[in-house]
Image (cartoon, rainbow, N blue to C red):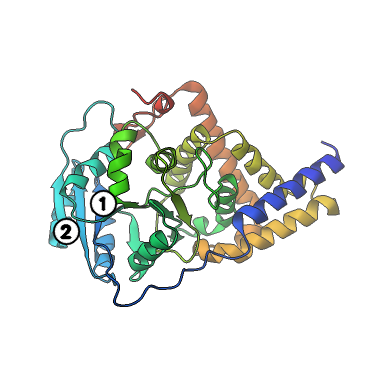
Amino acid sequence: MSHPVAAALAWAGAAIAFWRIGLRADADPPSRSEGECLPFVSIIVPARNEERALPTLLASFKNIDYPGFEIIVVDDHSSDRTAELARAAGARVLTAAPLPDGWNGKNWACHQAVPEAKGELLLFTDADTVHDPDGLRRAVNVLRARRADLLSALPYHRCEPRWERLMGPLHGLVLVASAHRTPKPRRLFAIGQFLLFDRTFYERCGGHVAVAAQYPDDLALANLCLRSGGRFSTWAGRPFFEVEMYPTFANFIDGWRRNVHGGLRQSRVSSPIETTLAFMAMAAGGHPTEIACLLPSVLVLALVLVRQRAWGRFSAWGPLLVPVSLAAYTVATALALYDMASGGTIRWKGRRLVGWADADRGKN
């Protein structure tokens, strides 16, 4: 590729990165009056063999500064002490019915909790999260201020493994690939670890029943929200919760493999194109000795260096060692493309993911 073309593509990628990532995080809307009644929230946690993570999550709920909420843990046929630990922590525990044909396990578990829930709002969250004391109050405030029917939110990554602290640029690429500030069907960004629904809208649009066989559930529900005439929003400000997703590098690649595949399948062609342009900007357009290519790379990596502090405990070495993130992204994308081409079966927590190869048809 000639230097002028590479430079033009790198600058285009830099412009997209600055637009999508932004120089500043979202600002919290003004707090509502102290005397205003806040809606009751049902926090629903689908859990399958989560005895390691669940106690930390449930302990964080004890510190939540919110007047009215309940915790429902759906034990999805765990073979460990998930249900026992949930009951010991004071959560209400439901045992999931056998998984029927045409459903993914997480969707089925969440669906069963809704008839038992009392809340005006439904918060679907994962067992590997830890919620800030003011997170729920702030999330409800954002949902109402934006008049949203469904709110998702970016987490704060705790990054316990040292290698994960180099992955800040990878999270920047994810934001570039999404239209999280102006979501449209098949052009959006959602995090399945935090989905706050207005219950009336959830029931009207069909909820998990309408996406029973679709994966990933977060993008499927966000698309459902928009297709049903609702308002979907993603919070990219101070996080409501923290997460430690991948204890090993193999888990990291496997998780990103699934996420990239799901994102590619549910996104329009422009998303991978924009991601590739940002990739080129970070890589100096393939010509790191040319100033016209190097400058957009420096600007994008400086942006990531500043903004990654809000995304997690990422190291300043991440942008400096950007080939590490780019290599991880390349491997995950290559594996995802292989899965898409081969129609291979993907398993998660001992189950085949229904809809992995056929979710676009909405059937098994």
> Percent position (x, y) of residue 215?
39, 35
Residue 184 rendering spot, x and y as whole percentages = 52, 42
Task: Determine which residue is flagged by label 2.
Answer: 91
Does 341 sit left or right of 81 as displayed?
right
Residue depicted at 15% across the width and 48% down the height: 116
The answer to whether the residue labelled 1 contacts the one labelled 2, judged by CB atoms less than 8 Å apart, is yes
- Picture quadrant where residue 207 is located: top left
Secondary structure at numbered mark 1: strand
Position of 2 relative to 181 (above/below): above
Residue pointed to by mark 1: 45
In this rendering, does residue 99 appear at all?
A: yes
- Which label belongs to residue 129? none
Kindly identify the amino acid type of the residue bearing the numbered disc 2. Ala
Front residue (pair 312, 25)? 25
Measured along the vertical axis of the image, is residue 139 above or below residue 329? below
Disc 2 element? loop
Where 189 sits versus 208, above or below?
below
The quadrant in which the C terminus is found is: top left
Name the quarter where the N terminus is drawn.
top right
